[in-house]
Amino acid sequence: MEKFDGITLGEWLARWYRVYKEPYLSESSLNNIKMVIRLHIPDDMKQTRLDEITPYMIEDAIADVTAPRMRQYTWQVFHAAFDMAALHNIIERDPMRLVPKVKHKQKIGNSLSPLEIKEFKHKIRKHPLRDLFEFYLYTGCRRSEALTVTKYDIDTVSMTLRIRGTKSKTSDRVMPISKPLEYVINRVITSADSYLFHVTGDYVSRAFKALCPNHKLHDLRHTFATHCLQCGVSMKVLQLWLGHASFETTASIYTHVVDAFQRTEASKIAWF
């Protein structure tokens, strides 16, 4: 295409982001992309013509990223941007075909044990963030998702709650309101102007860490999922409630929970 002759990597990334990503992804996903482009793609690369970028230049840029998860994000940005350029014949050959895929082994969360849950609920009885902490525990939503819930997301007729997904626009979901969650909602909805909770994510994480130094806030999400599976909720339903894009994601994280629970249940079988 004539108008792309001489386009630099930086110019292409800006267009790729604006046309192919910004209209479709959630704010948190877009922020990750912007962070990669701003911090992890060298300026001299951005000023280089797109068709002159080599696999070695990309590999060097990726190797300079120290955090494993961010290194994977950087590979994904390069891959998606060059894939789109090749698809539209802006470049003749995709250099990412020669760049090995960067893998990041996801750490399995550490859910709270029944005793830890009991102790945690006792600690937060008079804590200013009690309602928010219990909201995380009874919904399994991500940190930022809880902070975007408004009173208009609560349907008291169908007794359902809308969670606005932060991974992508397709991760928006609706889940039933359990009885414990109903108690939490009733306590906060009367004083809510629009949003149910008015705190920052960093503040919530620090407050939780002070209460549970051996856990991180995201472990409340894993605790919810673990409890659901142990109560007999199917993996497919759990996928919908957690807002995972695929069943495989849910299964890869929580299959060990089901296996362990089944072994415990099997031990109860007595033969006469």
Image (cartoon, rainbow, N blue to C red):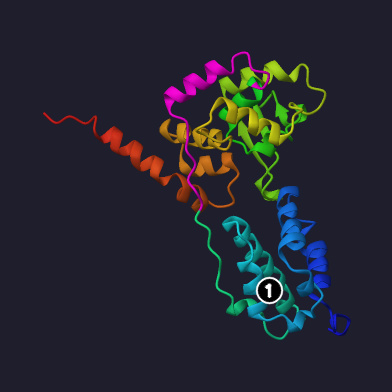
Can you give x and y, in whole percent of width and height, for residue 65 in the image? 63, 62
Q: Residue furthest right?
A: 3
Q: Residue at 79% of width from left, 63% of height from top?
A: 17
**As drawn, 8 above or below 195:** below
Task: Name the foreground residue: 38 vs 191.
Answer: 38
Q: Magenta region: which residues?
A: 106-129
Can you give x and y, in whole percent of width and height, for residue 36 in the image? 71, 60
- Say if residue 89 shows up in the picture: no
Task: Name the foreground residue: 158 vs 210.
Answer: 210
Q: Residue furthest top?
A: 126
Residue 232 shown left or right of residue 183 in the figure:
left
Amino acid carrying mark 1 in the image: Asp
In the picture, which quadrant includes the C terminus?
top left
**Figure disc tally:** 1
Q: Which residue is mark 1?
A: 83
Residue 140 shown left or right of residue 6 in the figure:
left
In the picture, which quadrant includes the N terminus?
bottom right
Q: Quadrant of residue 114?
A: top left
Q: Residue at 81% of width from left, 27% of height from top?
A: 194
Can you give x and y, in whole percent of width and height, for residue 22 in the image? 79, 57
- Verify whether residue 147 appears in magenta: no
- Verify whether residue 118 appears in magenta: yes
Q: Quadrant of residue 18?
A: bottom right
Task: Name the foreground residue: 245 vs 254.
Answer: 254
Q: Residue at 77% of width from left, 60% of height from top?
A: 38
**As drawn, 257 above or below 45:** above
Q: Circle 1 sits in a helix, a strand or a loop, which is it?
A: helix
- Say if residue 82 shows up in the picture: yes
Can you give x and y, in whole percent of width and height, for residue 86 in the image? 71, 79
